[in-house]
Image: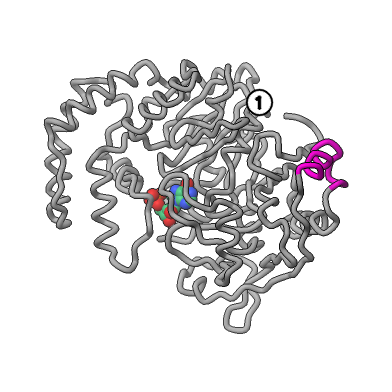
Amino acid sequence: MPTMAVIGAQWGDEGKGKIVDFLAAEADVVVRFQGGNNAGHSVKVGEELYKMHHLPSGIIRAGKLAVIGNGVVIDPGVLLDEINNLTRRGKSVKNLRISERAHVIMPYHRLLDGAEERLRKSARVGTTGRGIGPAYSDKVSRLGIRMGDLADESALKERLELLIPIKNKMLRAFGTKEVVDAKTATAELIEQGRLLKPYITDTGAILDTALSKDKKILFEGAQGTMLDIDHGTYPFVTSSTTTSGNVASGSGIRPTALGEVFGVTKAYTTRVGAGPFPSEIHDELHDRIVEMGNEYGTTTGRSRRCGWLDLVALRYANSLNDFSSLAMTKIDVLGGLDEVKVCTHYRLDGKKLTRIPSDLKAMERCRPAYESFEGWDELGPARLKSVLCGGFTRLPKSLREYVRFIERESGVPVSLLGLGRRRRELLDLRRKRW
Ligand code: IMP
């Protein structure tokens, strides 16, 4: 089956954008199927850095169809800014297609996101503040507005007349001073719908046709497995299903049409926002990894929490996603350390735990058990060049042992290694191209 999904195996920020950009070279279509502009995918091409929140990372490769599927929630203002930004930089977006079934993030969703976070007090999720949770809640409560409505002025006005007063009542009840001005919001949304209309269509039909013609379709996951609304560390999760099971419902293809699943993991772990993180590092090494790895959110600029690679989470991610192979990113960040650790299991009340517990309180009490590895030297430009030309055997021995250990323990082959920020600094170990 010529379809492949790229899924985050951790708490997001695994470097999926870079992997999608790389694999997109071989694809015909690149599809986002969940999440919204809480995602931030960065791709560095030469000296140019592209940061995408809504647009599939494949959009910067000419000639690919870029699809925003029905499972995504869209902030039309943000999407238009992104489109304008790309066109200003000489990139074409004529191949963009947006699902008429995707839901719109409304101005009141952003306000409600902030209000709900304040009400949660010390139990704050630490959301990106982009209105993601309230937009998905409205979708499920059948109070949403879809992209098809946005492009239809009379349908939009009718929905807004019903919804804005309800949402303003909620905002007031939540103690928020700022509410939505119906007149301004309506005018703005009508204009956004007008500008986006040329891209809005039945993307499920497009994908169905692409499948029937054996086109290569790449599905770009956002966030990561541990942030999945059902399987993640609830309630410290995002509001969508981030695992491979959602590729079908979030894009409209049939479930049996998904071929391979690429899991993306960093060589270590990061997470943004609150919630349990057993392998988190609490000493000065933490700050070093933040600096070396530039661990600041693409969307919010927040500094990320850093820890060792967690095999309990990785095995769990594999059991949920069925990874065909792994891409391990940011290996260079750990270069120069004397020792590198991997969390192999947790210990809880004297017992060994090898699966993520659903009880958050239990997870907070889990203590990590580590396997220790000799570190590897930083790969200078000459060594990096030799590795990229000569392959895996040119890597430092201790790094090879680290990678082999992770393959054995996770049961998944590692077939892409991220050795630097640039597009070409990926070591491709795949036996066959897509
Ligand atoms: P929300 O998706 O904005 O509602 O945020 C819920 C949780 O998911 C928070 O802990 C966020 O930090 C986290 N989150 C959402 N999107 C991303 C992402 O793209 N990378 C990493 N964490 C994310």
- Residue 322 visible in the displayed image: yes
CB of mark 1 near ligand 1 (< 8 Å): no
Q: Give the labeled residue for mark 1.
A: 25
Please name whichever residue, 297 or 16, is drawn nearer the observer in this view of the structure. 297
Q: Quadrant of residue 18?
A: top right
Q: Of helix, strand and loop, which one carries label 1?
A: loop
> In screen coordinates, is 256 left or right of 236?
right
Q: Is residue 49 magenta?
A: no
Location of residue 112 in the rendering, given as x and y in whole percent from the top left corner:
24, 49
What amino acid type is highlighted by mark number 1?
Answer: Ala
Magenta stretch encompasses residue 383: yes
Q: Main secondary structure of the magenta part?
A: helix
Above or below 7: residue 408: below
Q: Position of residue 291 (x, y in %)?
A: 56, 56
Q: Above or below — where is 366 with respect to 403?
A: below
Apparent side of residue 350 relative to residue 202 in the rendered image (left or right): right
| Numbered circles on residues, count | 1
Horizontal relation, residue 45 to residue 335: left or right: left
Q: Which quadrant would the N terminus be assigned to in this image?
A: top right
Q: Is any atom of residue 257 visible in this view? A: no
Q: Which part of the image, by quadrant, shows the C terminus?
A: top right
Q: Which residues are magenta?
A: 381-394
